[in-house]
Amino acid sequence: MALLVLSPVPASAEAPTGTVEGRITDRHGAPADAHVTAEAVSGGWSATAYTWDLGDGRYRIEGVPAGDYRISIYDNSRGFQWVPGAEDRAAATVFTVAGGQTLTVDEEWLPGGAVRVTVVDAETGAPVPRPCVQVHTYQAGWRCGTNGVVTLDDMQPGTWLYAVTAAPDYFPLEPDSDRRVTITRGMETALTAELRRGSGIQTTAVDAETGAPLANICVSVADPAAGGMHYTRTYSPLGSACSDESGVLRIGPLAEPIPVQLYAWELPRPTAQPNYGDQWMTADGGTGDQREALIVTPAEKQTVVLPEIRMDRPGTVTGVVTSAATGQPAQGTCVYPYAVGRNAGLGSGGRHCTDATGRYTLSTLGPYEWPLEFVSVTRAWQRSGGTADRFAATPVAVTAGGTATADASVPEGGVLTIEVTGGDGAPVAWGHAEVRNAVTGDHAAHGYIYDGAATLGALHTEDVLVHVSGDGFDCWHGPVAVTAGGTTAIALDIATHCGTRP
């Protein structure tokens, strides 16, 4: 209900104007944020004030020409409302602003709507234990419930997309883009959602020395057969790949119970040094060598509980990367403590990438031996020790609180050109091309096939496996010997040169 009070203000010699002021509260009487707009009934004049300028829910609009006005309030999380308490402009009160007067209009936000979502297992119909729902309003945070029920109160009216999950155990059956809910003020909308059971992983992150639980320790899930670090086959819309205050970390659901390895790292804190170093998780600690990492095979439609992730204090690796051809600093080379996967992205900045002097720094590594990878757009991808083979790399030993030096001289990248034709000899119109190191299976380069041709660069001297795929074909070929700084050309007929993945 709006409150109207008139009080005199000094008159002006110019066209008469007045002031509109007041206070906006929620339905409990507490001050609330709002954009407050006075809109002239005729003439098109309007002005807006913001309650956060004065605080305590108060607003003030000065210099309002004398006349008749409708007043509205708006907030990202509450929506739009006409004064007093109306959703329709036609129902709004017309207020008269008199010259030399102050019009006081207070307003209380109407209650929002509610949504009650019942979430069940698609196969059994049983309530999902820990469901969570997000309605994509400006209040778009996840809200979670228990025993299959999530209730969202005081939601913004309108028709909205919404998402349902129960990570790490359940998948939605349909894309979020197919889910919509209409929210009406003062009413509760009831929905039912079905989720499909997936495979999950649960563990606890602790300090390796004290055993104390650690929050904000995150895990990347790596498929050992994927050719490098990937965030593959996971569905974690809640950011559930990081530990909570009790150290508990839930990962999943995984689309299928494939073997995976876990790479643990501390969530970065702005301007702060890390407290804990990265690691590949083992059964009883950490390692820098992916080959020593624990391989976890989740059970189908079950959550596997793993040993604790025991986080150690970090150390630093720094060094200078130069071009083997010129001896000059190799600016823009990024250094990684793991094999970079096809979809991981190379990055273009940060201390792990070399500056104009060729200097890089990695300050988040656990106290283990690490086979570093030096990655560039044009220069050859190289491991510490000067090889393309991660298994033959010279590992860099990191100590907690210490600084190790690992310089590198990298050659110019080699080029592989691939001609791809179909069984009829015609060029393949479009597809993907990738090469992997023949020894380790690590990703080495990727690109696209256009009109039967693909060109891949930044290759070291190594034997590679060639993988081409597209509409109706998925072919592996090799090994093929390539040379840093050189060009190798091959021709593949997908009808005669295709093999299965080694």
Image (cartoon, grey):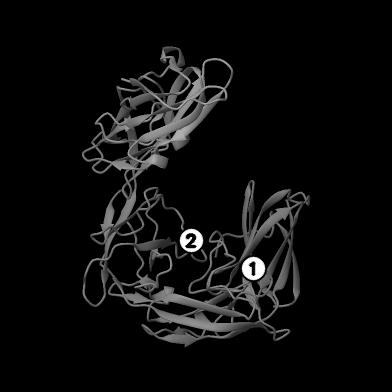
The mark that comes first in sequence, 2 or 1, is: 2
Amino acid type at image mark 1: Gly
> Callout 1 environment at 10 Å: few (<14), some (14 to 19), or many (20+)?
some
Q: Is residue 39 above or below residue 295?
A: above
Q: Is residue 345 left or right of residue 215?
A: right
Q: Quadrant of residue 294?
A: bottom left
**Residues at badges 2 and 1 in contact (C-beta under 8 Å)?**
no
Marks 2 and 1 sit apart, C-alpha to C-alpha, by 24 Å
The quadrant in which the C terminus is found is bottom right
Q: Is residue 260 above or below residue 321?
A: above
- Residue type at the position of mark 2: His
> From the viewer's perspective, is residue 349 above or below residue 43?
below
Where is residue 386 shown, x and y percent of the image?
A: 59, 84
Front position in the image: 332 or 40: 40
Q: Is residue 113 left or right of residue 343?
A: left
Question: What label does residue 74 carry, if any?
Answer: none
Residue name at image x 38 percent, y 62 percent: 219
Quarter of the image where one finds residue 442: bottom right
Q: Position of residue 393 (x, y in %)?
A: 52, 82
Residue at x-position 57% and y-position 86%: 407
Write the residue at 48% across / 82% down: 317
Tell me which residue sits at (51%, 70%) in the image.
Answer: 339
Reading the image, the residue beneath label 1 is 478
What is the x, y in percent for residue 31?
Answer: 30, 36
